[in-house]
Image (cartoon, rainbow, N blue to C red):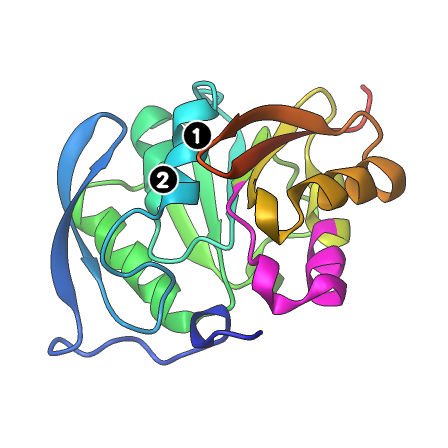
Amino acid sequence: MNEDHYFTASPASADERRHVTVTLAGRELEVETAAGVFSPGHVDLGTRVLLRTVPEPPATGDLLDLGCGWGPVALTMALEAPGARVWAVDVNERALDLVRRNAARLGLTNVEAVRPEDVPADVRFAALWSNPPIRIGKDALHGMLRTWLPRVAPGAEALLVVQRNLGADSLAAWIDREVAPGTAKLASAKGFRVLRVPGPAA
């Protein structure tokens, strides 16, 4: 099952954008969203579970929100770690435009909203948080995780939220076997698992 928001769309026009109020980093904030991105009307349940589970992000370094949508994870990272550089990565140009607009609206100058190929190859991440696009299909998802999980810095970790009914446990087993030994369930809530994926040993 493929959904339009997993693929590219042109930036939303002024008429297409709408303002919604959300809670991020413990603050009530107004952001812009639009149809054609994931969960345009609110912070989805999986992302809420992830953001309630993660520790405070590292204060410095490069942080990654993989599959950023309109930006709830990236904006949270940027609000909580103003001294870090936050990479909001997506293939959907509409999503990236919304992240840029929301970062500017919130006065966040530490957010880089870019396509995957625009992240410099030598960047290693002090944290990777993601609500990954499970519905793009197993092969595409595995390819994405094979690309990005090894870019977590030694001693750092990735935290992924995946719905249990969409294969969270089998995905954790695959990551542990094929990409990052030591991957395990960190938390479980409301039908979602939060997976902890360790970076390479130092």
Magenta segment: 130-145
Label 2: how many Cα within 10 Å (few below 14, some 14–19, many 20+): many
Q: Amino acid at mark 2?
A: Asn
Kindly check if marks 2 and 1 are in contact, taking CB atoms under 8 A apart as contact: yes
Asked if residue 102 lies in the magenta stretch, the reply is: no
Residue nearest the observer in this picture, 170 or 79: 170
Residue to which mark 2 is pinned: 110
| Location of the C terminus (image quadrant) | top right
Residue 84 is labelled as 1
Image coordinates of residue 55 in percent, x first then y, are 47, 19
Image coordinates of residue 112 in percent, x first then y, are 42, 50
Splitting the image into 4 quarters, where does residue 92 fall? bottom left
Q: Residue at x 73, y 45 (%)?
A: 171
Residue nearest the observer in this picture, 64 or 108: 64
Q: Residue at x 22, y 25 (%)?
A: 26
* Residue 74 can be seen, yes or no: no
Image coordinates of residue 166 in percent, x first then y, are 61, 52
Q: Is residue 171 left or right of residue 25?
A: right
